[in-house]
Amino acid sequence: MTNIARFEEELKHFDWSIARHELGYKEGQPLNIGWYCTDRICQTGRAKKLAMIWENHAGEVRRFTFDDMRVLTNTFAAHLRGLGVQPGDRVCVFMDRVPELYIGFLAVLKLGAIVQPLFSAFGDESLLTRLESSGAKVVLTQHKHGLKVRKIRDQLPALETSVIIDAGDRKLADGEVGFDLDNAPKVNDFESYPTTPETPSVLHYTSGTTGQPKGALHVHNSVFSQYLTASWVLDLQESDVYWCTADPGWVTGTSYGIIGPWANGTTQAILDAGFSADRWYGFIAKHKITVWYSAPTAIRLLMKEGEEAPKRHELSSLRHLASVGEPLNAEAVIWSQKVLGLPFHDTFWQTETGSIVITNMPGLPIKPGSMGKPFPGIVATVVDPKTFEPFDHPGAVGLIALRPGWPSMFRQYWNKPEIYASKFVNGWYLSGDRASIDADGYYWFVGRDDDVINTGGHLVGPFEIESALLEHPAVAESAAIGMPDPVNMEVPKAFIALKQGYEPNDDLELEIMNFCRKHLSPLAMPQAIEFVTSLPKNRSGKIMRRVLHAKEWGEEVGDISTLEDE
Ligand code: 6R9
């Protein structure tokens, strides 16, 4: 049987009970991700196996076995319980990629509380909107990031405690407590809270076109999807050393940087340091990474460094590569095949889907530039944007639609039921992305269907940038769009109409940029500002970012009359 025929065969017989069976889960039992990622691995004879190999920017390495992870998550969970954390409470994890981030994340789940991971580079304003929304009771953080929390805590009535993991002898403010995990008395036995498959687990914030970022709420049931996709798509085997380059502030860093791999009992290598080609290749060589999950922007950066850089390192341990977050261009697949001897396998999914839904699974021949096919058990299609019915001919461009029902599907947007409901039409979940399906059933990504900016794989909502700009006294109106960028695909650009009495000039541009820097995360910072006398609007006065976008990319503006009715 050919590979592709085997793949199609697999699709026919697939049932999610495979994951339940492999994880030894029986209906009616408690299901706790924290327990499945640590205690269960120990109980299945892998207590002494390495769970985490951690390295920082200085090259310092620490190693943790699954038994270490079990005891440390118990210790952290017991401490948090002592601070009054109850099941269902939101606990935010706001740290660099230090071991305490990973341990704290699982500890919160062991308590039956909801973990809200946030990217440590967020400034106080990005932090405020997300903590305000979640109503987090506790934040787990480091001293340097705790200072940002300290600045805004007056505006967060629900926030009781900041737990500072590296307080040392520093003076703490009201509401702050120090917790030194390494030196805390260890808790060997801790009973994980008996969460059910539908108990909320992770609350990930994601940006949309309008309004502030929304919290996509997941449940413990997600582990079945994350476990099985990590096993089948990332092809994780018992002897692998796996590296996911994503930060747990984003969903890839939790679904495939924590839950999926550790539920498989996989050894993960974690690099808490910035990008450089030599550092990355050196990391692969040093820890003999076998499976590598990264993103197109990083691959493009590596491509820019040329073909000599990888030759300086011993990369023969690598055996499987995958990519996520943005369109993986055909050149990147061809380049990696040539230079690393392996193609990158594309994987498409979202914060909302919780796990990979469309992918080039091993065994499926890759068509470079295509995202591949739906994962077994995922019913996907492309629907006509007008009728929301699937197209009946290949090649038509429409909206990627998924039939709800796989285990890791998000269950709600936190406190935003109307927005959640608006994502479902005709029984389909609409992803907000456009694509076509070819005659062989392969999906080809076309673009997003909304105004969200995907910069280097990170979604940035234009509204967040525009809100920050509007706080500046000179700004009357603003619109943010993505402009072309050779590495990040797109980067934010702002169009600004000034209030009367202000003149556009370089000084003002610099002043607005500096103002933004205080309010926005580095990713959301506009890389260019263009002053305009007015912004294109529709009849109801909404700014038409699409018109600006089309001009910026040298594309046809299209039928503005339909836009005017939006
Ligand atoms: C996992 C993650 C989701 C959005 C998604 C789409 C884009 C993700 C992609 C891709 C083209 C791929 N996206 N994977 N675009 N090819 N393989 O990235 O989640 O941060 O929620 O972003 O990213 O636009 O809708 P999230």
Image (cartoon, grey):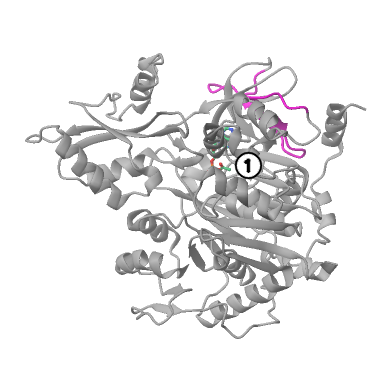
**What secondary structure prevails in the magenta region?**
loop
Q: Nearer the viewer, residue 313 or 558?
A: 313
Q: Is residue 217 left or right of residue 451?
A: right
Q: Is residue 424 visible to the viewer in this orientation of the structure? A: no
Amino acid, disc 1: Arg
Callout 1 environment at 10 Å: few (<14), some (14 to 19), or many (20+)? few
Q: Which residues are magenta?
A: 365-391
Residue at 35 percent of width and 55 percent of height: 123
Q: Is residue 499 visible to the viewer in this orientation of the structure? A: yes
Residue at 48 percent of width and 73 percent of height: 165
Residue positioned most to the bottom: 185
Q: Nearer the viewer, residue 94 or 451?
A: 94
Residue 5 in the image: above or below residue 55: above
Image-quadrant location for residue 20:
bottom right
Residue 160 belongs to magenta span? no
SS of the residue under disc 1: loop
For disc 1, the marked residue is 312
Residue 366 belongs to magenta span? yes
Residue 70 locus on image (x, y percent): 69, 72
Residue positioned most to the left: 501
Residue 387 in the image: above or below residue 24: above
Circle count: 1
Image-quadrant location for residue 178:
bottom left
Image-quadrant location for residue 331:
top right
Q: Nearer the viewer, residue 350 or 193?
A: 350
Residue 2 locus on image (x, y percent): 89, 26
Residue at 48 percent of width and 64 percent of height: 92
Q: Nearer the viewer, residue 288 or 85?
A: 288
